[in-house]
Image: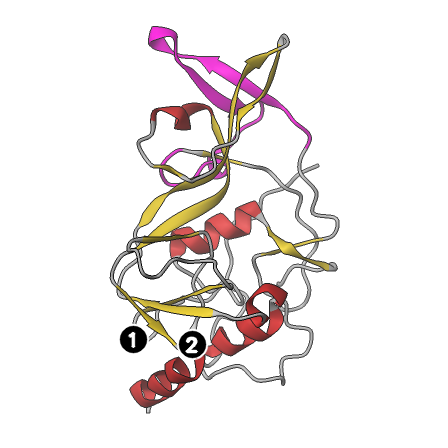
Amino acid sequence: MITRPLPYSPYRGRTTKESTPAEPGLIPFVIQREGEDAAPANLVLQRLAFGRYRLCYRDEDPRDRDLHGVLIARCAFNSVDERKMPTGKPQWKLMHPYRQMMTMQAMRCQVCAEPARTPLGYVFLAGPHGADTDRAPVLTNQPPVCARHVRAAVRLCPHLRMGATVLLARSAPLYGVAGVIYGYGDNSIQVVARPDTPLPYGHPNLSTFLASQLVRRLSDFRVMDLDELVRELGAATA
């Protein structure tokens, strides 16, 4: 049975100092774990007025949709440890859809799920060639990182270790979602399109869209070196 826990904050009350290797076994909150498999398909298309449809779950509850009403892909949840962090072997290439949604909507750190705002703004990370910073705005599916875990996020993620791009943003409004479009085919409901780019909120296809990731838009940002960012954060909190 797939359960969907309410959002929680596993590091509540801790300091915001930069993380060190003294946090053994640290794995980012958003990373999907082995055993957190996709839920069995129980999707239906609800007929609306004027020949339109709406994608739904047969047993849907309000937590199945984001703040804009887009349906989010379901995924199992493993048990949590004493820190209320997910357990299981990390699948580094995957983000858990619900935890990604939670951290993106609330602007919480992808590592610890604490509020991600720093004294300088919001910190976003991208891997090599992951963001064309010469052409604003930049769209990102990566939740922000708090000041305490900025180095840890780079150190822990194999993709970021190859060369991280640091984006310091003053604001990062929600833009849209990444995922697939459903429709009828061969007498059943199935994926009919896989958009190459995220669909913005308000797009007419979102009524039959199943989102796996939320996307934010960065238009006012600075590109920084990781060490430079850490120095400036240290000076801002001194």
Quarter of the picture holding the N terminus: top right
Magenta-span inclusion, residue 56: yes
Q: Is residue 157 above or below residue 100?
A: below
Q: Which residues are magenta?
A: 40-69
- Image point 33% across, 45% down: which residue? 175
- Image point 51% across, 16% down: which residue? 45
Residue 185 at x, y percent in the picture: 59, 12
Q: Taking 104 as reference, is 5 left or right? A: right
The residue where tag 2 is placed is: 147
Q: Is residue 103 above or below residue 128?
A: above
Count of picture labels: 2
Q: Badge 2, how many Cα within 10 Å: few under 14, some, many 20+? A: many
- Return the residue nearer the eye: 183 or 41: 183
- Gap in Å between the C-alphas at discs 1 and 2? 10 Å
Residue 113 at x, y percent in the picture: 49, 63
Q: Taking 184 as reference, is 15 left or right? A: left
Quarter of the picture holding the C terminus: bottom left
Q: Amino acid at mark 1?
A: Leu
The residue where tag 1 is placed is: 120
Give the quadrant of residue 33: bottom right
Q: Amino acid at mark 2?
A: Ala
Q: What element does badge 2 sit on?
A: helix
Residue 57 at x, y percent in the picture: 55, 25
Q: Is residue 24 above or below residue 123?
A: below
Regarding residue 16, the answer to whether it shows in the image is no
Which badge, 1 or 2, is on the more N-terminal residue?
A: 1
Magenta-span inclusion, residue 129: no
Q: What element does badge 1 sit on?
A: loop
- Return the residue nearer the eye: 19 or 61: 19
- Image point 63% across, 55% down: which residue? 93
Q: Which mark is residue 188?
A: none
